[in-house]
Image (cartoon, rainbow, N blue to C red):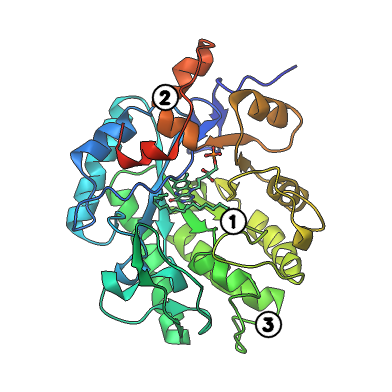
Amino acid sequence: MTTDLLSPFKLNDTLELQNRVLMAPLTRCMADDNLVPTQDMVEYYARRAQTGLIISEATIIRPDAQGYPNTPGLFTSEQIQGWKKVTDAVHANGGKMFAQLWHVGRVAHPHFFDGDVLAPSAIGVEGSVPRMRELTYITPKAATTDDIKSLVADFAKAAENAMEAGFDGVEIHGANGYLIDQFLHYAANVREDEYGQTPENMSRFALEVTDAVISAVGNERTALRLTPGAYFNMSEDSRDKAVFDYLLPELEKRDLAYLHGGIFDDSTRFDSLEGKTTSEFLRAGYQGTLVGVGSYSFETAKEAINDAKFDLIAIGRPLIANPDYISKVANNEELVAYNDEMLAKLV
Ligand code: FNR
Ligand code: 8K6
């Protein structure tokens, strides 16, 4: 029997999705200057409520989490109220929505806030802020254990704020070379304390954040996105695999809503993962609900889910180009092709 991606999927006892097609988290840099979601954002998300679950664009947990212009936040009451309008509109249209909780770590830029740029270690990245190329990345400060405690607490606080804002759950952004991912990779983590050097230590921050968020909102409303193979703001190291070999079974014990791979093209194979793709590697190490992503069409996603490669699919760029993606694929209608110029405007 083949699985119908457009029929409901029970995530757990708390959440049932109307279908298996998720909207991938997509940074759009369109919040207002107080990092509050706008009315255009309300309408943009509401138009996509036919997806099984909308994952919000990455949303910063506190001021020093910011590395891109006009990315929304979840740490002021104005931001919470702004998101409430988004989630109300999505719910009114029959959808569900998780907030993606974000701290960019060493790719933060002090242009956006007062204070230090925090990261596991004082190792900078080459390059500059997208769309603001004059802002070159600086060498971060290695977080102290007190800094780490406050970061963990602020992830949990942002998760609580997400509940107040009416989200159905949260996806912790542990992917794509940002703060949590920086702890998980040798290229960014040379700490000599209990957060570095061994797979168990390097997984500690990710697990502390996950546990704090679970305490705040419950395991059934907590998800995590991971990038085991370094590809963005990060370089590969042959030792990385051991970190994720330790982390995945630990996560499985926590019975999350789902685990999500963070990658642009899931056919990319990683030397550091013994030649596996992101979803192959995650599936091998994690038996819970897995979300695949990365250059899938509806057809290739259906094939992958029927081959048990993962359970749910997240669609990114095609949903930028087609707000009505679900009804189009349901009716076999042709999709509008995505191009980068579409990022200039919320449609
Ligand atoms: C992304 N992606 C991304 N990932 C993430 O975890 N948080 C984010 O905020 C963003 N933002 C973002 C913005 C834009 C413009 C793009 C194109 C991508 C990655 C995204 O979620 C997804 O993994 C990729 O787009 C691959 O999926 P598709 O687009 O091939 O379906
Ligand atoms: C091109 C404009 C981007 C607009 C907002 C910034 C998006 C940041 C989110 C991370 C995704 C960036 C794309 C990276 C591609 C790497 C491919 C190997």
What's the distance in space between the residues labelled 2 and 3, CA to CA? 44 Å
The image shows residue 243, relative to residue 192, as above or below, that is above
Q: Position of residue 87 (x, y in %)?
A: 30, 38
- Per the image, label 3 sits on a secondary structure element best described as loop
Place of residue 146 in the rendered image (x, y in percent of width and height, measured from the top left) = 42, 85
Label placed on residue 329:
none
Q: CA distance from mark 2 to mark 1?
A: 25 Å
- The number of numbered badges drawn on the structure is 3
Secondary structure of residue under mark 2: loop
Q: Compare residues 207 and 100 and report the one nearer the observer.
A: 100
Image position, residue 117 (x, y; %): 39, 78
Residue name at image x 75 percent, y 46 percent: 280
Which quadrant does the C terminus fall into?
A: top left
Front-lying residue, 8 or 272: 272
Circle 1 crowding by C-alpha within 10 Å: few under 14, some 14–19, many from 20: many
User: Mark 1 sits on what residue?
Assistant: 226
Q: Which mark is residue 197?
A: 3
